[in-house]
Image (cartoon, grey):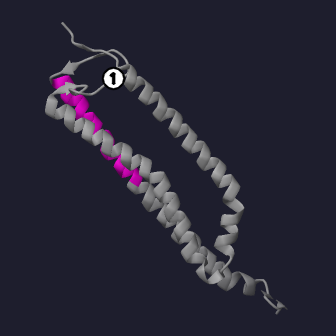
């Protein structure tokens, strides 16, 4: 006989609340970015001597905002996979479910536990790759900006004082 873990109404409410709060936080981020985009740009450009530092800071904050959810989910999946491997049961004992779920044991549960941990590794690698690529992008932008400042104006015969 297959064991069925019964749905927990409190867990269902908690899951719905988590989704609603996540959507609300995402909407707030979009609205906040639209509202403060121009003041942020003005702040970045306000002191030319600190431009490179401020661009790096803004990109660092963006990388943190993009990577943090991936890393948090990867940590959760790794710990869930480890609990499944220890218990040799999916879902592990003590985990609440949002719908009636058959409990899987043995080799099938071990395969799911390993799959969860592999997914966690992939998410961690994706987060690291995202950080690396955005950092490379910042370096390329800043190098190109430095090249434009040094060469473009003199190439076209234009200086800050006017024509050469």
Q: Look at the numbered disc 1 and give the secondary structure of its residue.
A: loop
Assign the C terminus to one quadrant of the image.
bottom right
Q: Is residue 13 above or below residue 161?
A: above
Kindly identify the residue that appears in the image at 37 percent across and 17 percent down.
99
Kindly identify the residue that appears in the image at 20 percent across and 35 percent down.
83
Asked whether, in this view, residue 87 is left or right of residue 138, the answer is left
Q: Residue furthest top?
A: 1
Quarter holding residue 3: top left
Looking at the image, which is closer to me, 52 or 140?
52
Q: Is residue 76 above or below residue 147?
A: above
Kindly identify the residue that appears in the image at 48 percent across and 52 percent down.
66
Residue 136 within the magenta-colored segment of the rendering: no
Looking at the image, which is closer to me, 39 or 77?
39
The crowding category of the residue bearing disc 1, from other C-alpha atoms within 10 Å (few below 14, some 14 to 19, many at least 20), is some
Looking at the image, which is closer to me, 27 or 152?
27
Asked whether, in this view, residue 66 is left or right of residue 107, the answer is right
Inspect this view and state whether residue 143 appears.
no
Place of residue 38 in the rendered image (x, y in percent of width and height, measured from the top left): 71, 62
Inspect this view and state whether residue 15 appears.
yes
Asked whether, in this view, residue 50 is left or right of residue 6, the answer is right
Looking at the image, which is closer to me, 71 or 36?
36
Q: Residue furthest front?
A: 10
Assign the N terminus to one quadrant of the image.
top left
Place of residue 74 in the rendered image (x, y in percent of width and height, measured from the top left): 34, 44
Place of residue 106 in the rendered image (x, y in percent of width and height, measured from the top left): 15, 23
Q: Which residue is mark 1?
A: 97
Place of residue 144 in the rendered image (x, y in percent of width and height, measured from the top left): 60, 74
Kindly identify the residue that appears in the image at 37 percent across and 49 percent down.
71
Q: Residue furthest right?
A: 163
Q: Which residues are magenta?
A: 107-127
Magenta segment main secondary structure: helix
């Amino acid at each position: 006989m297959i064991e069925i873990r019964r749905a927990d109404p409190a867990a269902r409410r908690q899951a719905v609340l988590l989704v609603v709060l996540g959507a609300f936080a995402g909407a707030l981020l979009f609205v906040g970015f639209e509202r403060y985009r121009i003041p942020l740009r003005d702040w970045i450009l306000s002191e030319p001597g600190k431009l490179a530092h401020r661009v790096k800071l803004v990109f660092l904050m963006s990388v943190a905002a993009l990577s943090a959810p991936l890393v948090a989910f990867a940590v959760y999946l790794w710990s869930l996979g480890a609990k499944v491997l220890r218990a040799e049961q999916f879902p592990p004992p003590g985990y609440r479910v949002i719908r009636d779920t058959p409990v899987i044991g043995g080799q099938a549960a071990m395969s799911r536990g390993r799959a969860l941990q592999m997914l966690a590794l992939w998410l961690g690698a994706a987060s690291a790759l995202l950080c690396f690529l955005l950092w490379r992008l910042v370096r390329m932008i800043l190098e190109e900006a430095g090249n434009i400042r040094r060469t473009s104006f003199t190439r076209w015969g234009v200086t800050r004082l006017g024509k050469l």
